[in-house]
Amino acid sequence: MLEWQIDERVKNILNRIHAGVLYCKNDNYSTILYANDYFYTIVGYTKEEVKRLFGNRFADMVVDDVSEILMDVAASIERGENLDFEFRMRRKDGQIIYIHDTACYDKEYNCFYITIMDVTAMKSIEYEREKFNSYLQHLPNKIIISDSEGNIVYKNSEAEKCTYFDANADRLIDLVKPYIIGIDFENLEETLKKGGRAQYETRFKKGTEFIGHDKNYIVPIKDKNNNILNYMQVSENLLSNSDYLTSFPTRAMFEYYYKQLLANRGLMSAFLCIVDIDNFKSINDRYGHLIGDEAIKLTAKRLTEFLGQEDYICRYGGDEFLLLLIGIEEEDVISRIHSLLETSKRTVCLGGYEFYLTYSIGVAATKGQRISYTELMKRADESLYEVKLKGKGRMIIYQEACTIK
């Protein structure tokens, strides 16, 4: 079958198709008997150049190993199946392009009807997607991507293997909302709807132990028209940088949390408590530093028991802890600390030693005022100093004589 034997009307139709259409011999070169105009547009050569430079041998224009392709072709003919391949070709300008080839075998003439399409752009997108996915998979942070409606569409390996994430959660909101601290969820949601970026902490607790504490950054991903396509949350594990004995946040994180609350909420009711273990040096000297460490851990568990969802805690020094109690009344603070002090009246047994583990506690309240972190710490420290002057094992609230014996 020669090109001049194809009806001119059929040629006109084929030349209007935006895909390469060919009729090729079933030989080792897939010799071209006919090709429409768009085929030559794809490869960048003229019809005359393909004939002169390649002798119309289609296979000579293919970059990949054609021997493997020919073996697959023979196997497909044997099974009576149509052909469907992808391979690379080199254009006249030297560019390597990806070709999607589909073909139907004409047994009578031992030839193929072939359609080819340039899928380089699609392959480039796939390559970039794979590269981006590989990048996300190798990050030490947990990455979660949702669609514009909040449905989770992607997790990297760190997020997948995170033990405190709910593996059954389909929506980002269900994964984080119950654990967000330091920011009102409604404000967060409003910021995101407007296309803004947000930063917040999530904390996960099991019994009296923190099992997860993350700083999260959530970023809207937009198209060129500023429409939100996705949300990407990047979560940094704060526990890895926390106090090694208690898994509590650092002093810097504590201070930052208070300042963020002040910035986001302004006037708020909060109590800052400094909890000091009484006679801690004597515990270390008498029973050893390992027992001292156990006393630190036990105190951490006691304090964690009465923390609310948004309350914050850190180990301030060797034997001191900071507590930030949010949105409660003074009576509730007194009640909580009273429970702690009552507990400390019972002896503890650590490492075979029995002794009392008591506390002195200084407290300062914001009382709905905008008080700086430095000033609030100063007031709590003054209260603690007063406790130690009047006798350990009790609490005092700044400027108010509220002592629990």
Image: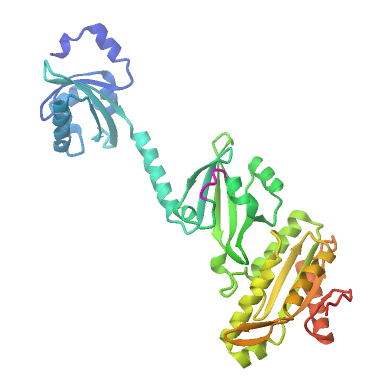
User: How many labels were placed on the picture?
Assistant: 0
Secondary structure, magenta segment, majority class: loop
Res 41 → quadrant: top left
Q: Is 221 situated left or right of 102 in this image?
A: right
Q: Is 268 situated left or right of 247 in this image?
A: right
User: The C terminus appears in which quarter of the rendering?
Assistant: bottom right
Magenta segment? 167-171
Res 260 → quadrant: bottom right
User: The N terminus appears in which quarter of the rendering?
Assistant: top left
Residue drawn at 51 percent across, 58 percent down: 163
Q: Is 193 situated left or right of 62 in this image?
A: right
- Locate residue 257, reporting x and y percent: 69, 62
- Locate residue 255, reporting x and y percent: 69, 67
Residue drawn at 71 percent across, 51 percent down: 184
- Locate residue 330, reporting x and y percent: 84, 65
Q: Which of 360 and 287 is in front in this view?
A: 287
Residue drawn at 17 percent across, 33 percent down: 72
Q: In this view, does 130 lie above or below 346?
A: above
Q: Is residue 350 above or below residue 61?
A: below
